[in-house]
Amino acid sequence: MRISIVTWLISILLKLALVDKFRLFDRAFYKRPTLIVAKELLGTKLCRRLPDGSVLQAPIVEVEAYTEDDPACHAFRGLTERNRVMFGLPGHAYVYFIYGMYFCLNVVTEPENTPAAVLIRAIGVTGGEGPGKLCRLWGIDKSHNGLDLCDLQSELFICKGDKVNKSDIEVSTRIGIKLAAERPWRFYLKGHPHVSGRKKR
C-alpha cells in the first residue's frame, strides 16, 4: 500500500511539474476570430511529443489565416471528409497533404461549425522555414490530424511563449495561392531568420 501511495504522489508531482513547464492555452483562446488568433499565435511555442516522451519546442514565427468566407479556405465549399476537423471544436490540429509530398499543420479556430484555421508556416528552428518543411522536420503527418492542442499529453500541443508586441509583427498577402490572393492575412515576426518566402509587404 505504501509503495502504491508513493508512486501515486510521484505521478501527481510529475504532472504538476509538466503543467508548470508547459503553460497551455485553454480552448477559449482558439474560439475567437481567426485573424486575432493568428497574430497571437506568433511567439507561442509549438510542441511535439516524441515516442520516448521527450518534447521538441520551437516558437511559431509565421502564420496565415483562413476563414469560411475565404475562397482560398478548404472549407469554403462546405463540409468534406478532408476538412471535417475544421468544423469541430477549436484548438485541434488540422493536417492535410499537398502536392503529393508535403503535410501542412493548421490550428482550428472559431466556434464549432464555423470552419476556420491558422496555417503554421514557420517555426524558429533551422529547417522549420515553411509549412511542408517544418512538418517533415518534426515528423508531423496525417496521423496527427484532429489531435487536441489543448491536451498536455497530446503528441502536438501549443504553449505560451514570450510576449510579442504589435510593432514586432509584419503583415503581407498570403503565399502560394491564387484565390483571394490580395488579402493581407499572412503574419510573421519582423526580422526573424526562419521566416519562409518573401519578407516584405
Image (tube, rainbow, N blue to C red):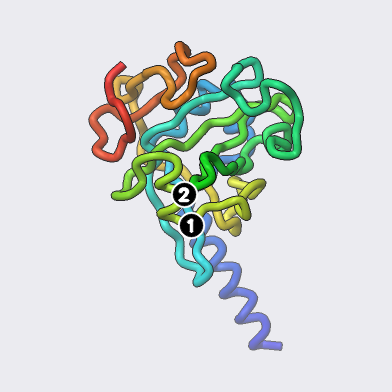
Q: Amino acid at mark 2?
A: Cys
Tag on residue 101?
A: none
Residue 19 in picture, x, y percent from top left: 53, 55
Q: Residue at x 47, y 52 (%)?
A: 47
Which residue corresponds to the image point at 23% horizontal and 30% vertical from the top-left? 191
Give x and y (percent) for residue 38: 49, 28
Q: Write down the quadrant of residue 44 in the picture.
A: top left
Q: In the rendered view, does 195 fall on the left or right side of 48? A: left
- 184 is higher (above) or lower (below) than 124: above
Instruction: Please name whichever residue, 151 or 61, is drawn nearer the observer in this view of the structure.
Output: 61
Quadrant assignment for the N terminus: bottom right
Q: Nearer the viewer, residue 122 or 59?
A: 122
| Residue at which label 1 appears | 139
- Are the residues at dot 2 and dot 1 in contact (C-beta closer than 8 Å)? yes
How many residues crowd around disc 1 within 10 Å: few (fewer than 14), some, or many (20 or more)? few
Residue drawn at x 57%, y 43% as measured from the top left:
97
Q: Position of residue 58 (x, y in %)?
A: 38, 48
Amino acid residing under circle 1: Gly
Q: Dot 2 corresponds to which residue?
A: 135
